[in-house]
Image (cartoon, helix red, strand yellow):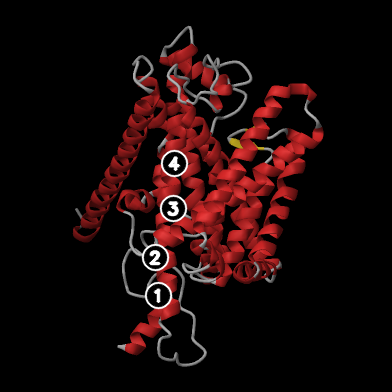
Amino acid sequence: MTEARRSNAGRFGEATGKRWTAKVRADAFTDRSAHALPARRAPAPLPRGALQPAIGREKTSIALHNMRGLAIAFVLMTHACLAYIASAPAQPFPFDRPPYGWLTFPIVDSRRWFGFDVFCAWQDVYLMSLWFFLSGVFTWRSIERDGGLRFLTKRVLRLGAPLLFGVTLLMPVALYPVYRVTAPDPSLTGYVREYLALPFVPCGPLWFLWLLLALTLAAAALHRFARRTIPTVGNLSQQLESRPIRTFAIWIVVCVVAYVPLAFQFTPWRWATQGPIAVQLSRPLLYAVYYCAGLGVGTAGLGAGMLRTDGIGPRKWAIWMAAAAASLALWMGLTGLILHLGQSTPLLLEAARDASFALAGACGVIFVLAFCLRFGATERWPLFARLSDNALGVYVLHYAPVVWLQYALLGLAWPAPLKAALVFCGATASCLAAIAAARSLRRSLATRLSSRWVFGS
């Protein structure tokens, strides 16, 4: 019995054989068919009490599972709230004319609440960085397990197929209400004509998938040609426990260097589109920093470095929460001041705003990670479990029901929080129902095809 437990202890999330503790893939989305990482061969028999590292890995696996569910819920909440933030434009943007502001605000409702501005601002500074960090955590070990070519094949299929499906089918469905709000001819034929006349192919939130795929290709190249680079980053992660101030300062400096020059060059808000590819020009390097940080942290293994459930992050989670709130307030204050000053804004003030954005993002990522490691390492959170299990499907599908529900509620004089709650709940339920229906259909088709093959009918 002891030997069996030891042989399983090397697998991430499999220390106790629970079926739901190894569900995170290299892209941070759910893996419902494969275990996590292969076992490492122990150099010597483990002494008494040596199951503690395996328990730590299991706790971290549960915490990351909960964090993925929380993160996908925040994605849904953010898009559900965008129609009701106080700083949204007074009128909807025309569908067929620049600057195509409906890419950011697809539906604009007259009911507003300033609390949504604060919430969406907080998500803007850290949420996608957190997604790239979480995606990188499992990538390096997955490459070592599968090999570069097989890993890339699986990643291209897993990320490329949903991206193609979303851009070609889901986005045209999602944006029809956006067209109807301002179009003189709200017919379907008029929409098809105007949609095809756009100088780009709208991809909405699916930009994350193509950028993640590009970073995955870069990770495979690093593994092939510069294998020692990422473990060096992992060693820095280990130092967070012994030298937290120094390690965090290095992280902030790297984030500032990656973000501020591009924000100066392109402004923090400018997007570029080329066909179905869209990117916020100030942020690709920043996202790459978080992805590489995740790669490095992943080399240390679950339960080690930044992923320790008893580390300095979880122990000091309240301090990180205060730091996240203070840095967010600083960035929002500087942003508001710059908007007030307009063209007369000094360059030094703009640099301070951009640096505060990088600071707020880092504090937000560490706070959410620390919070989940502190309070989400014992059992799965029931409210987020299904979202975590179906993270990729929910991310790909959610935009269409969010936009349609916001459009359906336009004529109702209900409070903005109530509308946003209805949109969030309705979009979540519809995504989960669609995923369940698709899986049921797939099982039914597989059964029929299998029966015909066996019986020749």
Label 1 sits on a secondary structure element that is: helix
Q: Nearer the viewer, mark 3 or mark 4?
A: 3
User: In the image, is residue 83 above or below residue 230?
Assistant: above
Of the numbered discs 4 and 1, the one sitting upstream in the chain is 1
Determine whether label 2 and label 3 are within 8 Å by CB: no
Label 4 sits on a secondary structure element that is: helix
User: In the image, is residue 38 above or below residue 152?
Assistant: below
Residue 22, numbered label = 2
Q: Nearer the viewer, mark 4 or mark 1?
A: 1
| Residue topped by disc 4 | 396
Determine whether label 3 and label 4 are within 8 Å by CB: no
| Residue topped by disc 1 | 55
Determine whether label 1 and label 3 are within 8 Å by CB: no
**Residue 319: image location, x then y, percent:** 54, 55
User: In the image, is residue 407 above or below residue 325?
Assistant: above
- Dividing the picture into quarters, in which one does residue 435 lie? top left
Of the numbered discs 1 and 3, the one sitting upstream in the chain is 1
Q: Nearer the viewer, mark 2 or mark 3?
A: 3
| Residue topped by disc 3 | 68
